[in-house]
Image (tube, rainbow, N blue to C red):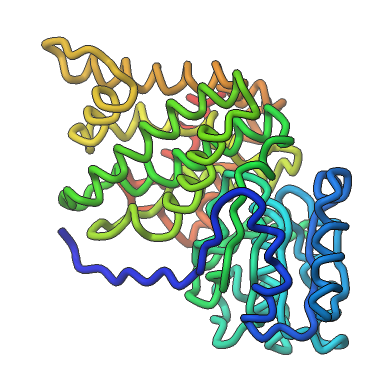
């Protein structure tokens, strides 16, 4: 087990109707003028936004609004938010929505405290030292951004999708009501299921030594998401299944499943190039396509973890061939993604041109300035092999 620091300061309010406490919660965090940050559709159509505004008014807390966050949140809206926070004297940001809204809010929070573009944090030319506090009302189980220290945004001018980690990115509080996820579309629900599983898997499958308490928790989370995912796709209003996904969303990305382990999350980095270059690709869909392709190259170097995935999560019956059982598990995972409505090839995402695959592989190297050191070493050649396998 490797050395680690575990610090998860986000205060969680979990359960039915917890969002109705937003006025008193904001007051307890000394918020006096709040930026309400949200997307384009569901929080407006469902009436949630109006409900939250009424509750904040009742608490006599002033606010301004900035909607319009898209999937793969954009730098241009972040910069608009930074200007709004600075000119309006905002002292708290409330993100209402899914992971894209949360990441946009985090980027605004650190960007509002500096004079340079927040993009410099994403490309790691600068590092944040201060942030406006952020709170969350989560409406989608997926990214785990409600408790994580990560923030990922897209520069639409350069078509680069980049992330950075900082303790300042962790929200002050997160309100998690599973009922708010009932209206999420089947496709976005499935994307979320994949993202949650990948956040755990990419920590669990590594070349670092065992960390048995962490590893067992990871296996438990994967089993819970695998089983709840099947239930919720058949019964979208199954409270227990939605609750399982929502809580697993948080636990999979708040640092718990990496205690005692080193990790890189190379499949996430491969996917960031895909959805950065092809903006219509949902993050979870890209992961569903790329993980089985990556796994076929990676499993010989992490057989113990792949075997546990096959036997303990995917219920593969052991034979006298470990390689056979692992490959059967990888295929079972791919079939699970297909079963819940996810694409399983780049062709299904309309990525078919060989030149596009070569461009993606080149982009992974950041203009030949890096090689991803993970379970397998991913340089331009290996990246192209993985993208070709995924096609």
In this rendering, the answer to whether 32 lies above or below 134 is below
Residue 118 image offset from top left, x and y in percent:
69, 76
Q: Nearer the viewer, residue 381 or 304?
A: 304
Q: Which part of the image, by quadrant, shows the N terminus?
A: bottom left
Which of the pair 14/160 is nearer the observer? 14
User: Residue at image x 84%, y 44%?
Assistant: 46
Query: Outermost residue, left direction?
Result: 320
| Residue drawn at 65 percent across, 73 percent down | 25
The vertical placement of 310 against 284, above or below, is above
> Can residue 158 be spotted in the picture?
no
Q: Residue at x 45, y 73 (%)?
A: 9
Asked which quadrant contains residue 188, the reply is: top right
Location of residue 317 in the rendering, given as x and y in whole percent from the top left corner: 22, 12
* Quarter of the picture holding the C terminus: top right
* 302 versus 163 height, above or below: above
**Does residue 199 appear to the left or right of 129 in the view shown?**
left
Looking at the picture, how far across and down is residue 286, in whole percent? Answer: 59, 35
């Amino acid at each position: 087990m490797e050395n680690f620091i575990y610090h998860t300061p986000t205060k969680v309010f979990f359960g039915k109707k917890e969002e109705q406490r937003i006025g008193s919660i904001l007051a307890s965090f000394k918020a006096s003028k709040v930026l309400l940050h949200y997307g384009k559709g569901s929080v407006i159509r469902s009436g949630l936004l109006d409900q939250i505004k009424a509750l904040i008014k009742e608490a006599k807390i002033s606010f301004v609004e900035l909607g319009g966050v898209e999937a793969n949140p954009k730098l241009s809206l972040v910069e608009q938010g930074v200007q709004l926070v600075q000119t309006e004297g905002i002292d708290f940001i409330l993100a209402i929505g899914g992971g894209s809204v949360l990441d946009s809010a985090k980027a605004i929070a650190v960007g509002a405290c500096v004079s340079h573009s927040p993009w410099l944090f994403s490309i790691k030319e600068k590092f944040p030292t201060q942030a406006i506090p952020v709170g969350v009302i989560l409406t989608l189980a997926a990214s785990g951004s409600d408790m994580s220290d990560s923030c990922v945004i897209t520069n639409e001018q350069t078509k680069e999708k980049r992330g950075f980690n900082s303790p300042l990115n962790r929200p002050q509080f997160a309100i998690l009501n599973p009922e708010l996820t009932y209206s999420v579309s089947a496709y976005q629900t499935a994307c979320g299921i994949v993202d949650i599983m990948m956040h755990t898997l990419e920590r669990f499958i590594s070349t670092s030594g065992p960390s048995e308490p962490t590893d067992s928790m990871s296996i438990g989370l994967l089993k819970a998401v695998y089983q709840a995912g099947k239930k919720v796709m058949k019964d979208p209003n199954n409270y227990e299944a939605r609750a399982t996904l929502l809580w697993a969303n948080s636990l999979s990305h708040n640092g718990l499943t990496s205690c005692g382990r080193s990790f890189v999350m190379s499949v996430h980095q491969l996917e960031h190039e895909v959805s950065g270059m092809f903006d219509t690709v949902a993050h979870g869909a890209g992961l569903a396509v790329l993980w089985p392709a990556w796994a076929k190259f990676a499993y010989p170097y992490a057989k113990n973890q792949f075997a546990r995935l096959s036997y303990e999560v995917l219920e593969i019956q052991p034979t006298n061939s470990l390689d056979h059982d692992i490959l059967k598990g990888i295929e079972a995972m791919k079939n699970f993604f297909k079963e819940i409505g996810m694409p399983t090839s780049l062709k299904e995402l309309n990525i078919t041109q060989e030149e596009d695959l070569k461009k993606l592989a080149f982009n992974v190297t950041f203009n030949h300035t890096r090689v991803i050191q993970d379970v397998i070493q991913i340089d331009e050649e290996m990246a192209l092999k993985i993208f070709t396998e995924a096609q």
